[in-house]
Image: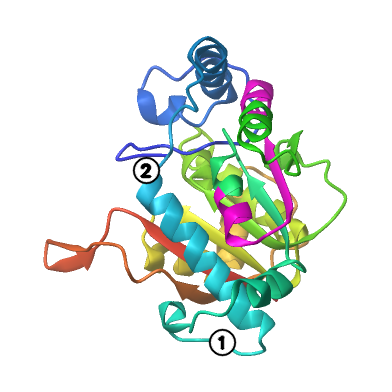
Amino acid sequence: MYVLIVVSIVYSSDKEEPDPEGMASMLGLQSYWDSAYADELANFREHGHAGEVWFGADVMDVVASWTKSLCISISQGHMLNHVEDLKSEPVEENDKYLSSWSVLDIGTGNGLLLQELSKQGFSDLTGVDYSEDAINLAQSLANRDGFSCIKFLVDDVLDTKLERQFQLVMDKGTLDAIGLHPDGPLKRIMYWDSVSKLVAPGGLLVITSCNSTKDELVHEVSNLSQRRIGVSQEHEIKDEEACREPPFRYLNHVRTYPTFMFGGSEGSRVATVAFLRN
């Protein structure tokens, strides 16, 4: 979700009123998203509007097609340095590879990313969000648009009740918003601990962010143990898992987003990064 562009959300179950310091902390609170999706659901029921496409439709299309190519390359038994170089296969071959991938979209919002993944050939699709109205909107849109096979559940990724693991977990803006909570550093540690349980060993986590660069996300994952120790000490939490190896390792990232130069460094307004579950 940000510059602030924002994306469907699913973090902690905080109901308190927004921090007066401003919009950034508001975007990290469930009360903000409950209100936002109540408005979007009412707008859908009255006018049929799908609501906001976080990061824009172009980015969503890139995320869906790039993720499809990455999953196919893994299913074929090889990794590519540049997923964009993957040779196209017949549709029937794609379906064969993608049918085995169970997909979870955390912070699904209106569920449109799952619709795009369904168009790409994925079939085992589940979306969760901690806002009940977001789930009601996503289910209504899926039914209207002919994607009734997609499953939607109310669930908070920081306190998930899901009892299964998925080969592919998608996050389009959820980690961004979690980091904007007043207790952002602690919530991010909770996020990684929870997501590591949702991604099956050898599975993928694909994060799309406009608050973190590719290098920042990779650095965060590689330094999870040190961050966990620091946050545990700050909040006086006994963390018996602080010395574990990081649960994920960097695999690949989207290289086709437009870039710009700022302060002598090259960057883009959005990053999509894939991590492999160890």
- Asked whether 168 falls inside the magenta stretch, the response is no
129 vs 20: above or below: below
At horizontal 50% and vertical 28% (from top left) the residue drawn is: 50
Image spot of residue 120 (x, y percent): 58, 60
Residue placed most toward the observer, 254 or 113? 113
* Residue type of the residue flagged with mark 1: Met
The quadrant in which the N terminus is found is top left
Residue placed most toward the observer, 230 or 33? 33
Q: In the picture, residue 135 is in which quadrant?
A: top right
Q: Is residue 91 visible?
A: yes
Q: Which residues are magenta?
A: 116-137
Q: Residues within 10 Å of mark 1 (few under 14, many from 20)?
A: some
Which residue position is annotated with label 2?
Answer: 56
User: Which residue is outermost to the bottom?
Assistant: 78
Q: Is residue 245 visible?
A: no
On residue 79, the disc is: 1
Image spot of residue 125 (x, y percent): 72, 51
39 vs 242: above or below: above
211 vs 67: above or below: above
Q: In the picture, residue 156 is in which quadrant?
A: top right
